[in-house]
Amino acid sequence: MHSTFRRRSLFIATLAAAVFSGSAALAQDKNNIKVGVSVGNGEQIFEVVRKVAAKDGLNIQVVVFNDYQLPNAALASGDLDANAFQHQPFLDNQIKARGFDLVPVGLTITAPLGFYSRKIKSVDQLPDGASVGIQNDPSNGNRALLLLQQAGLITLKPEAVKNNNATPLDVVTNPRKLKLVALDAAQLPRSLDDLAIAAINNDYAEKAGLSFNKDAVIKESPKSPYANLIAVRRADKDKPWARRLVAAYQSPEVKSFIETQFKGSLIPAF
């Protein structure tokens, strides 16, 4: 009798612990989140993501940024729950420079980088001594310089290429005597009248009415390693809402929208 009572008590205690554990896990989840995205195609894609997530009971408030320097600070400070605007090299540089404790939880799109111009239609028309705009942040600046090297316009130090940290100081040959002008990524489209060509990230190019497929005079391969990602604070990386957010983005509906809407200028990375 005593043994039976103990077994029943143990069963009830175990059941209660399981229920409590499940309730605690459920309490840690939430159904309302804020996600930071960049202006342009990020907004468009997240309209679809938001609708898919709503079917799963996850309500997403989209916060739009015009500056690449702000979304990680907003995420780190708790003003956002997640952001989706950057690739891994950019995140790595921001963590190194600013000490953010942020981690990726899922891939989104690859946005090939292009050089654009209002003055020439082909890179063959680029004059000697031309002013060439590149981004002033380390990861995108490196990316632009690699693209110039791939186009045969400059040569970079092999070590800088290997480490993905090239700057204008790493240019070892520049036969066309190009003038490299480093500007904030958001300023480059507005500076096209003063530059012969400029590297412009896809979201800013789209906002400026530029098409990667039609207007870029130098094009990065879609197979580049610069896939964008969803980032969260490290403490949130295993939260159920984070998995639900990634699942909504990586859904068939979102993939179909990206492929149909952007026709190769943006490519699903999942």
Image: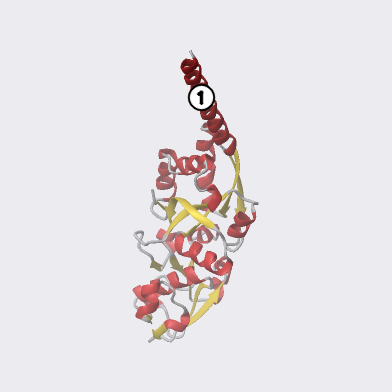
Q: Residue at x 43, y 43 (%)?
A: 250
Instruction: In the rendered view, tell whether residue 87 sits above or below residue 218.
Output: above
Q: What residue is shown with label 1?
A: 15
Instruction: In the rendered view, tell whether residue 87 sits above or below residue 147.
Output: above
Residue type for callout 1: Leu
Judge by depth and name the residue closer to the eye, 217 or 91: 91
Judge by depth and name the residue closer to the eye, 234 or 214: 234
* Quarter occupied by residue 217: bottom left
Instruction: In the rendered view, tell whether residue 139 sits above or below residue 259.
Output: below
Q: Residue at x 48, y 68 (%)?
A: 139
Q: Residue at x 42, y 83 (%)?
A: 171
* Quarter occupied by residue 122: bottom left
Residue 20, given in percent of the width and then of the height, sits at 56, 30
In the displayed structure image, the side of residue 128 where residue 12 appears, left or right: right
In the displayed structure image, the side of residue 31 where residue 5 appears, left or right: left
Is residue 233 visible from the viewing direction of this image? no
